[in-house]
Amino acid sequence: MKFQYHLKKEEQHTKARLGEFIYNGVLYETPMFMPVGTQATVKTLSPLEIKELKAGIILSNTYHLWLRPGEDLVKKAGGLHQFMDYDGPILTDSGGFQVFSLAKNKKKDICEEGVYFKSHIDGKKLFLTPELSIQIQNKLDSDIAMSFDECPPARADYEYLKNSVMRTLRWAKRGKMAHQNPNQMLFGIVQGGAYADLREYSAKETVKMDFDGYSIGGVANDHESKEEMYNAIDYSIPFLPKDKLRYLMGIGDPIDLVEGVCRGVDIFDCVSPTRLARHGHAYTKYGKINLKNAKYKEDFNPIDPNCDCYACKHFTKAYVRHLIVADETFGARLLSIHNIRFLVHLMEEMRLAIQNDTLLEFRTQFLKDYQGGTHE
């Protein structure tokens, strides 16, 4: 079912927005962090646990589900919601990020029709087009589908990025024409690297196509600086409509979430909470910590005394450290629960600050605490 986004309030001192939508009779508020369930599961957690963490939209990956188990099987199962037993909203990305990372020779493998690449599973040569990406997402029956865009290297030169933006616009038009699921929203994606004029052009031309929402892409690259990321947001946001969702793709660092919200972004996603958990890392109010460190061996305090999650209510750092060091799955589960709840709660705090027009004060205190702590 399509849901209608409503803008409730714009914060007085920033570009932050408070919004809401109703899905299956449940009210969801934005700004929101979306946990990633790449292969129709958020790693180590059940759908019930995701709901108990008060997460809203979750994200699944078109590329991975296309290869395994296949979109036809998911459709036969009744779509992603039935297949994974999640009755909340689901977003599927286009598969573009994974495909472009697997296309080794960009000049050779990327053509006007689509992208040639090799499967990470068996090395089989595959070809993905804007139309096929949308058709796969139609069959997955997610609530939000993403346009298939070119994901250019962060350090690409101006001419490359200009051509990339034009190709992404052509692909967006082709994907929109191929979209055949009336219950599914379709988002367009703004590209343009760190260039203000390309971002503006991309945003304006994408908005002309009248998508259900808009994403800011090309900002989750390991070689991109924080300043370039924030500039890309600032160059894009002014040209996006106020009455539709704005999505910053692939971003989950707590500081980036705060900065993104202040700049007018509504929804974010990232694999970082569960990935960090599997390596023993936890978010806390005073920075990120590594529970593998020996100093936590006899630390009988919660991971974060400010957190209300199951892990922090019931277990100590010493116990979680023991699980991680012993390579017990329960340790990764507990840290995944905590890390996701930390980011979801951070969004709750920012929504309250937006409501009270105190987001700048919140930002200042959060950064002071988080950056002033010991990051390990």
Image: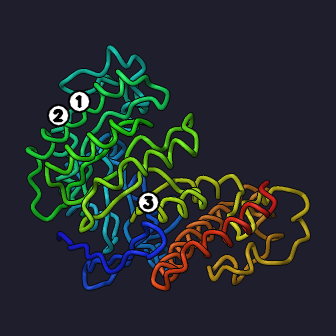
Residue furthest top as drawn: 108
Disc 2/disc 1 C-alpha distance (Å): 5 Å
Coordinates of residue 118 in the picture (x, y in percent): 37, 25
Question: Which residue in the structure is indicated by mark 3?
Answer: 268
Coordinates of residue 233 in the picture (x, y in percent): 43, 50
Between residue 13 and residue 230, name the one nearer to us. Answer: 13
Question: Which residue in the structure is indicated by mark 2?
Answer: 170
Q: Dot 2, how many residues are within 10 Å of its Cα: few (below 14), some (14-19), or many (20+)?
A: some
Q: Is residue 11 left or right of residue 200?
A: right
Instruction: Name the residue at 13% across, 41% down.
Output: 173
- Is there a contact, CB below 8 Å, between mark 2 and mark 1? yes
For residue 241, above or below residue 104 = below
Q: Dot 1, how many residues are within 10 Å of its Cα: few (below 14), some (14-19), or many (20+)?
A: some
Q: Say which quadrant the C terminus sits in.
A: bottom right
Instruction: Name the residue at 41% across, 28% down.
Output: 102
Coordinates of residue 357 in the picture (x, y in percent): 49, 81
Q: Dot 3, how many residues are within 10 Å of its Cα: few (below 14), some (14-19), or many (20+)?
A: many
User: Circle 3 sits in a helix, a strand or a loop, which is it?
Assistant: strand
Instruction: Name the residue at 32% across, 19% down.
Output: 109
Q: State the image quarter where residue 156 is shown.
A: top left
User: Circle 2 sits in a helix, a strand or a loop, which is it?
Assistant: helix
Question: Which residue in the structure is indicated by mark 1?
Answer: 167
N-terminal label among 3 and 1: 1
